[in-house]
Amino acid sequence: MNICLIEDDPIMGETLAERLALEGFGCRWLRTGAAAEAIDPGERVDAVVSDIRLPDIGGPALFERLRDRLGAKPWIFITGYGTAAQRDALLRAGAADFFTKPLDMDRLVRRLRSFRAEAAPRAEEACDCPLGVSAEMKRLYATVNRLGAHWDTVLVTGESGAGKEELARCLHRISLGDAAPFVAVNCASLPESLIEAELFGYERGAFTGAQRMHRGKFEQANGGTLFLDEIGDMPALLQARLLRVLQDRTIARLGSEQEIRLDVRVILATHKRLNDEVRAGRFREDLYYRINVVHLRVPPLRERPEDVLWLAQRFVGDWNRTHPTARRMLTPEGERVLMRQRWPGNVRELRNTIERACLLSAEEWIDAPLLATDEEGNGEAKEASTAAPAEPARLEDFLRDQERSFIQRSLAQHNWQIGLTAEALGISRKGLWERMKRLGIQ
């Protein structure tokens, strides 16, 4: 993130420039308004920190002049003579924040980091792969794109909570678009006595309690996609009927002999190893071969650690969009805690951990204790009194951790594209590669 610092005081300017550089920001220090007005329009500026009193122009007037040239960049004013009325007027005019001297440097750094976090959803929207930034998820997304609209039945496997339904929705959007219906059914959650009626529907009077005709999930998904989750738990008798439907693409409601032809795509998912279920006699072999034409495996989160921070920022962004008056951000210490977890509950556990931390945090910034999970990995938050992980004892180790965390976040925000990340960091591609090698970033 590149900061344009406009400060005429040499001591304050040097102090701010050094602190911002230590925090991992790119910083260009200018001493006059004229120097700021001479900025090349092609130069990257992500935020501006400006004194209100400059030797040649007032900060508010400079803000008005540069707003069109720089675009809607966050602008923070700093002053030693600020008043509440001045602050309110500047915020109404579009300034992002207002700080009085002596500066609270930690708060200023947190505020600048919040701008980067707010830009993360836009970076995510521009990301080529909506499933993650890891090589595994990019390969999976490439396969989904190759399938396009040329499929009718797909098998998705993976551990519980790994993101099988998210992959199914992605495949649906690519092949049919958002306008077509997408109907999801968890076969394990339906009682055996009701699952057939829920899937295929029934006519009025088909059984006791059938007061009206009911369209089943297959009919509801007609023209779109039906997602059947946990098919490994489907009763044996229903497996035979499902095989017939997949072959003929026709159904008959309970209590009716009329065949209904369907135009529906079916995605089936399970966390079980179906070939083992076939050998054990719990899953029909002919059904297994019918659905195992295209098999997509979603890797668990522990096999793609590059996705942890990307997903965490995405979930925090979801919270902020839903709760604009209770915004949350992750601290670097919190991010390190997330990266150290094994996440046996996969993406679902990570999502729940972030949501719980957002709920329980009393401040805007979510720190390490709220994100730590217990040793059993069941996702329960530790008591608030739990001590945060100890910082490295040596300054060299601390700066190394900060540098690694910053580069990993930047790589994730830029879809792990070395050229774009190097440009954003203000270093060469070779320099970034050397830093990644030195810091052990794969």
Image: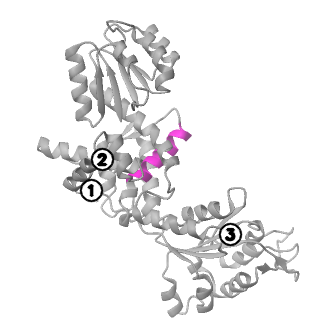
The answer to whether residue 374 shows anywhere in this view is yes
Q: Distance between the residues labelled 1 and 2?
A: 9 Å
Residue 140 position (above or below residue 57): below
Q: How far apart are marks 2 and 3 (CA)?
A: 41 Å
Mark 3 or mark 1, which is nearer to you? 1
Per the picture, the main secondary structure of the magenta-coloured stretch is helix
The answer to whether residue 280 shows anywhere in this view is no
Per the image, label 1 sits on a secondary structure element best described as: loop
**In the displayed structure, does residue 220 sit left or right of residue 416?**
right
**In the image, residue 239 lies at what x, y percent?**
66, 85
**In the image, residue 91 lies at what x, y percent?**
48, 17
Disc 1 marks a residue whose amino acid type is Ile
Q: Name the residue under label 2.
A: 407
Disc 3 marks a residue whose amino acid type is Leu
Tell me whether circle 1 and circle 2 mark residues in contact (CB < 8 Å). yes
Residue stretch rendered in magenta on the structure: 309-323
Choose between 189 and 268: the one closer to the eye: 268
Disc 2 marks a residue whose amino acid type is Ile
If you read the primary sequence from the N terminus, does the residue marked by circle 1 or circle 2 appear first?
A: 2
Q: Name the residue under label 1.
A: 441
If you read the primary sequence from the N terminus, does the residue marked by circle 3 or circle 1 appear first?
A: 3
Mark 2 or mark 3, which is nearer to you? 2
Q: Which residue is drawn at 32% across and 55% down?
A: 339
If you read the primary sequence from the N terminus, does the residue marked by circle 2 or circle 3 appear first?
A: 3
Q: Residue at x 69, y 62 (%)?
A: 176
Residue 108 position (above or below residue 329): above
**In the displayed structure, does residue 385 sit left or right of residue 299?**
left
Judge whether residue 95 is colored magenta: no
Q: Name the residue under label 3.
A: 226
